[in-house]
Amino acid sequence: MSTDENKDTPPTRHVVAGNDVSVFVSYAHKDDDSSYGRVKKLAEGIADTYASLTGLEVGIFFDTESIRLGENWRDRIRAGLNNATVLLAFISPSYLRSPACREELASFFAFLPSREGRKLVIPILLFPQDRIDRLFPNDEQWSDIKQLQWKDASDLRSEEVGSSSWMLIVGQISQRIEEALDEQSTIDSSSTLIDTDTGFNTEDPELREGTLEEIARAEEDLPHVGTLVRTYGEKINQFNELISNATASFASATSFGQRLAVARSLAKKLEPVVDDSFRISEELREVIQGVGPGIISIIRMIGASGEAANPENRDVLDFLKTVREMAMQSLEATDTTESMMTSIEGGKGFSKDLDKVLSRMNAGLLMFYESRSHYKGWLEEVNRIYPDNQEGLQ
């Protein structure tokens, strides 16, 4: 029980500015509830063991404990992700069916400067891999997770907390975090593009030329992102129109046979639209993964160099304006996808053919939704070095 003097002070185990290492715990609440709190206990054990192993100050972020009353929970989670050193992702069917969990993982990926940085993501499987493979055979995010050095902790759902088996897994994951951070430190120290302590070396003409070349390449890719987002929006409209037209036919059907016929007819009409939208989602995901980290790096280089402070530097300011507008438009396009996925799940059960099409549509929507993490990252980085009320980007 806290006093009035310290009730607003976060506990030292949570993420604060003085932490040497900050751990963000990404998990589905159903998994913690169904295992009688073992997910959170496992995460706490990993953080405590790592602190004991290294002697470092470790902060840990749980969404239910690290967000105070009155805070915007999405903004607070975003801040926790941005400040985190390590993401512990507790993977399960519930996790992969949760848009919020998937966005947390995609957000962390989006803020990493390169694919090498993914070594800081530690996936922990709460169920055996073959079960998740069977349920999510074509899931792109699950495919990405399997490429990382994940740890199988499925037996711990029934293991006594603090047992020898429990402590063995905790110790192995803690050691993996230490190895990953050591590897990442080597990568960071070898980089000559960005120095967060001394700033971008603006006196080196080759580096400045390189910045402009990177901007030019990013400018070529950004319109393609916009085209894909708009095209996907058109496919969503077509999908919703077909669903709307079929609603009256369902309502007027007087037998189960007639309803089945309507469902099968709708499935055939939806199939090409869903296939197109899924293909567009895959292409957008590939483009975003290719250009996203580069855009973050470019914006940070611009900020470190001070180039955004020069109103005469129109090339740089126009680039920042383009990124901001693209991010805002794309975020708007993804705003309705979460409710749409929920609606589609609720519409299943009429027929096997229709369920198959609806499941594929939801898989595409998930991919499309995950891209919003990159757009948020771009927007936050631009606003950090050039707030949206400054004249130059209006």
Image (cartoon, helix red, strand yellow):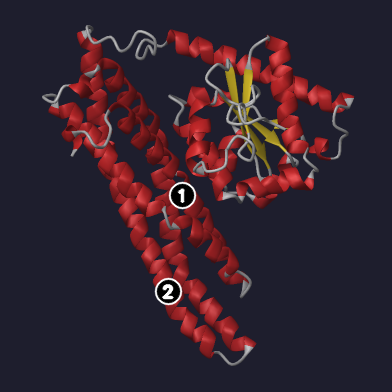
Say the numbered circle drawn on residue 245.
none
**Secondary element at image label 1:** helix
Seen from the viewer's position, the closer of residues 265 and 358 is 358
- Which one is nearer the viewer's eye here, 298 or 42? 42
Position above or below: 58 against 66: above
- Residue depicted at 39% across the width and 9% down the height: 197
Q: Position of residue 5 (x, y in %)?
A: 60, 27
Mark sitting on residue 242: 2
Residue 238 visible at all: yes
Q: Nearer the viewer, mark 2 or mark 1?
A: 1
The residue under the point 51% across, 37% down is: 76
Image spot of residue 325 (x, y percent) = 26, 43
Q: Which residue is mark 1?
A: 369
Q: Give how far across and how far down residue 29 sits, in percent.
A: 68, 46
Q: Earlier in the sequence, mark 2 or mark 1?
A: 2
Quarter of the rendering occupied by the C terminus: top left
Q: Quadrant of residue 172?
A: top right
For the residue carrying disc 1, how many other residues have a C-alpha within 10 Å: few (<14), some (14-19), or many (20+)?
A: many
Nearest the viewer among 355 and 89 is 89
Q: Position of residue 254 (x, y in %)?
A: 59, 93
Image mark count: 2
Q: Nearer the viewer, residue 124 or 16?
A: 16
Which residue type carries mark 2? Leu
* Residue that appears at 66% across and 30% down: 3
